[in-house]
Image (cartoon, rainbow, N blue to C red):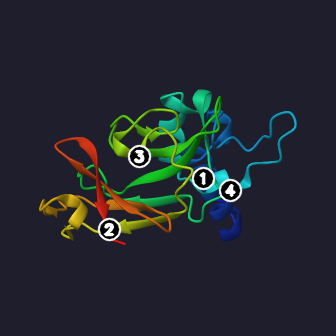
Amino acid sequence: MRIKFLPLANLLALLFCNAGAAEVDPGRWQGWCDERAGAGESAPLSRLNLPAWACIAAFTQNLQRDYLPYTRINPFFLNGDFDGGGRLGMAVWIAQRSSGKLGIAIFGRGGVPVAVIGAGKPWGSLGDDFSAFYRFGILTKGANLESVYGHGKLVHLKTDAFTLGNDSATFAVYSEAGEFLEYRLEE
């Protein structure tokens, strides 16, 4: 009996092409990560930077019906353990389709529902539109938040947090007991 071996290049191509198709198949979902452009739209290449797990979570929760990723802020997403689950999630700038109001979609991992703040949904003192903010940063777990605006309240971050800022104010968004809260930082 003779055994026929495939050339190494063919074998590697077969393995990697099939593995990639199983993990990231834009045909499996439509929405934020769909490579096809809608009528009158240019191809959404920047949306492809989102990892497959975030694309699937957005599609599963039907976010594409009401929101679009907002890519005019760089970076338009940040990675961090924002929910304290021990795995990297992400915070993504979004725009409400009907009004154009901006906000953030916060993705956890392991089936945690996506939290939407702003983007037409009133949230804390920041309201329902975050279009005044153009700075987006991250604070790591363990940092302390203290500000004259906190009225003496010291917050020790048990999770990663992100910041939203402009020339007049910066806010930290952090998770505590499963709820996302804001904390105004000093400028």
Amino acid type for the residue under numbered disc 3:
Leu
**Residue 2 seen from this side:** no
Q: Secondary structure at mark 2?
A: strand
Q: Secondary structure at mark 4?
A: helix
Query: Horizontal and vertical percent for residue 78?
Result: 46, 61
Quadrant occupied by the C terminus: bottom left
Viewer-side label of 3, 4: 3
Q: Residues within 10 Å of mark 2 (few under 14, many from 20)?
A: some
Q: Nearer the viewer, residue 151 or 12?
A: 151
Q: Are marks 1 and 4 in contact (CB under 8 Å)?
A: no
Residue 139, numbered label: 2
Mark 1 neighbour class, 10 Å CA radius: few under 14, some 14 to 19, many 20 or more: few
Q: CA distance from mark 1 to mark 2?
A: 33 Å
Q: CA distance from mark 1 to mark 4?
A: 19 Å
Q: Which residue is mark 1?
A: 20
Q: Which residue is mark 4?
A: 46
User: Residue 15 sits in which quadrant?
Assistant: bottom right
Question: Considering only order in the chain, which callout, 4 or 3, is on the residue closer to the N terminus?
Answer: 4
Q: Amino acid at mark 2?
A: Leu
Residue at coordinates 80% horizontally, 40% vertically from top-left?
Answer: 37
Which is more N-terminal, label 2 or label 3?
3
Looking at the rendered structure, the kind of residue marked 4 is Ser
Disc 3 from disc 1: Cα separation: 41 Å
Q: Is residue 37 above or below residue 61?
A: below
Q: Earlier in the sequence, mark 3 or mark 1?
A: 1
Which residue lies most toward the right here? Answer: 40
> How many neighbours does mark 4 have within 10 angstroms: few (below 14), some (14-19), or many (20 or more)?
some
Residue at image mark 3: 126
Q: Nearer the viewer, residue 19 or 114?
A: 114
